[in-house]
Image (tube, rainbow, N blue to C red):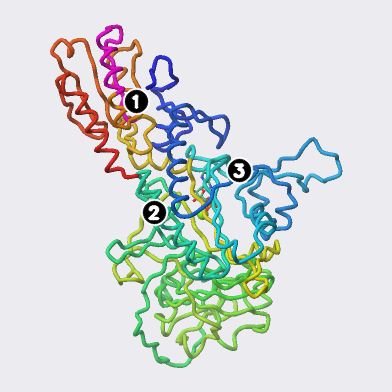
Amino acid sequence: MQFWSKYFIPTLKESPADAEIPSHRLLVRAGLVRKLGGGLYTYLPLGLRTLRKISEICRQEMERAGAIELQMPHLHPAEFWRDGPRWTAAREIMYRADSAGDGKRGPSEPEFVLGPTHEEVITPLMKNEISSYRDLPRTFFQIGAKFRNEIRPRFGLMRAREFVMMDAYSFDADDAGAVRSYQAMKAGYEAFFRRVGAHAIVVEADTGVMGGSFSHEFMVPAEVGDDDVYFNEESGYAANREKAASALVPADHADAAPAGAVEEFPTPGVVTIAALAAAPHAVPADRQLKTLVYIGDGKPFLVILRGSDELEEAKLGALGFAVRRPATPEEIEPVLGARPGSLGAVRGTIKNPGALAGIFADHAVRLVGNGVTGANRDGHHLRQVNVTRDLAITSFGDFRRVLPGEPDPKGGRPLQVRRGIEVGHIFILGTKYSEKFGAVYANDQKQTHLLVMGCYGIGISRTLQACIEQSHDADGIIWPWNVAPFHVLICLLDPQLPEAMELAKKLGTTAEQAGADVLVDDRDERPGVKFKDADLIGIPLRVTIGGRGLKEGIVELKWRAAKEVQKVPVAEVGARIAAGVSDRAKSAGS
Ligand code: ATP
Ligand code: MG
């Protein structure tokens, strides 16, 4: 039992100026955190209590999923990252933590970095510790601070520079084993999010060059989220924007027969889809073929889309180029023979086809049938271009951004889109890290094989805030039972009355025995202030004891999520509280 007058809950009437979203405002106003600097927060006692509860639920579910807890350093010798597969990419988000320095290293050669995750630490560790198939499978996890130099830290704990993550790593003998470990962790995640009271949707996520569907993100639907979730509840389809597909091209689609010979026509000054769609040419955007040029691993390649579609850049990851970027006009002209605005992929019009690493068309291009595209001659286009007959396509793929309302790929029902917050991520890594670090094991024939890995992350501190974002009203937080800093708030309107204090302690003990964490508001404050603070900090059950009520033999119970106040005779109130506590605890699950 904590007594507010001796505890530390600095609530605020005003929101901090930099808090743009409700959960951020409430975090600060309810006295859960204080800002130290951009993306850096101190957890005050109330915030820390919730953080600990979320961490503990996570720990229990990870252990239930078979994972084993350990703890790695936050400070990493930079060598480990230099030896790993993502030094170049990860450097930008890593904080360097150099010592005073011996002056031997240049400013671009850090001695230490602060860990943004721990693949580079755990893989070399397991290379040394795991030698035989008998040591497999193993999944390890830890819960601790991560450091990322986010370009724009914002929304409080949502995107911080230092934040708390549960990160886990699985090690298996083969792909089938890795999938089993992955599924066990996925089930553990589902249990975790259910228990903390966050309604997270599991979505298929982009795996870049990996392919397959062995990456899922856990998204909490919220207007303020950074990500789009495409879903249809009935079909059970859900994917993030980078991965979302649709059944736009029907399975029985028959490609159009040619409508006539290809014709060139002048289009001076027309360099956009919109301009070609306008008078005098009036070619609807979905009859146009758009040609984009990218550079993949140093070589140009083309992506063909319908004029009406947008490229979803992440989907190009499936093509397998390690590094890719849009080509510049200077790079495009020598290969295609024209500048952007007049580009196309019609056979025979490309100036230097041998320079191309491939021509990749989106499936929806087949719906164009006969369309209009650039002639690879500035100021000219071609019409009656037949997709099958005239385009030199290397392969078809899914490259376009899906639009709401399109049929989902699972059940053909209309896709809906909702904003979401990514609270967790699971991923099969394969042998990317074990190959780099030489992490192998010997099988029963004494042959060595690479360890097959998976990695897993839950944003513990982001989940804390997502719970608030999902569960609050105009007056404050409405904590889900399992993560509430306290479950029962005993509000003493006349704390100086000995019989009131005595009853508070008695009811507090009863509630504790039923399994609740209890806070007693014994401050010398007006009732109005106490009720406002009670709503703000969002403790699930408020028990109000006042001098007047005591004279009538009455105590008031109010659930934070409900409107009505129940007046309960003093003789019955202990039993009512105990029953309420065990009910809530039971329905919140453990
Ligand atoms: P995001 O796309 O939001 O930047 P991410 O995909 O880079 O996140 P992961 O590397 O998948 O993040 O990390 C695992 C989890 O850690 C994320 O699902 C998220 O919940 C949490 N997380 C990542 N970055 C931050 C951050 N800057 N602040 C708070 N939590 C974070
Ligand atoms: Mg992620």
Please say whether residue 24 is one of the residues in the magenta stretch: no
- Magenta residues, as a range? 487-509
Please say whether residue 508 is one of the residues in the magenta stretch: yes
Residue underneath mark 1: 518
Task: Tell me what residue is drawn at x 17 percent, y 14 percent.
Answer: 549
Mark 2 touches mark 1? (CB < 8 Å): no
Measure the alpha-carbon separation of dots 3 and 1: 34 Å
Between disc 3 and disc 1, the foreground one is: 1
x, y percent for residue 323 = 65, 66
x, y percent for residue 461 = 48, 40
Answer above or below: position of 130 versus 255.
above
Task: Tell me what residue is drawn at x 24 percent, y 38 percent.
Answer: 583
Res. 190 mark? 2
Which sits in the foreground, 288 or 18? Answer: 18
Q: In what quadrant of the picture does the N terminus appear?
A: top left
Q: In what quadrant of the picture does the C terminus appear?
A: top left
Task: Tell me what residue is drawn at x 34 percent, y 33 percent.
Answer: 477
Could you tell which of marks 2 and 1 lies nearer the N-terminus? 2
Q: Amino acid at mark 3?
A: Phe
Q: Is mark 3 within 8 Å of ligand 1?
A: no
Residue underneath mark 3: 147
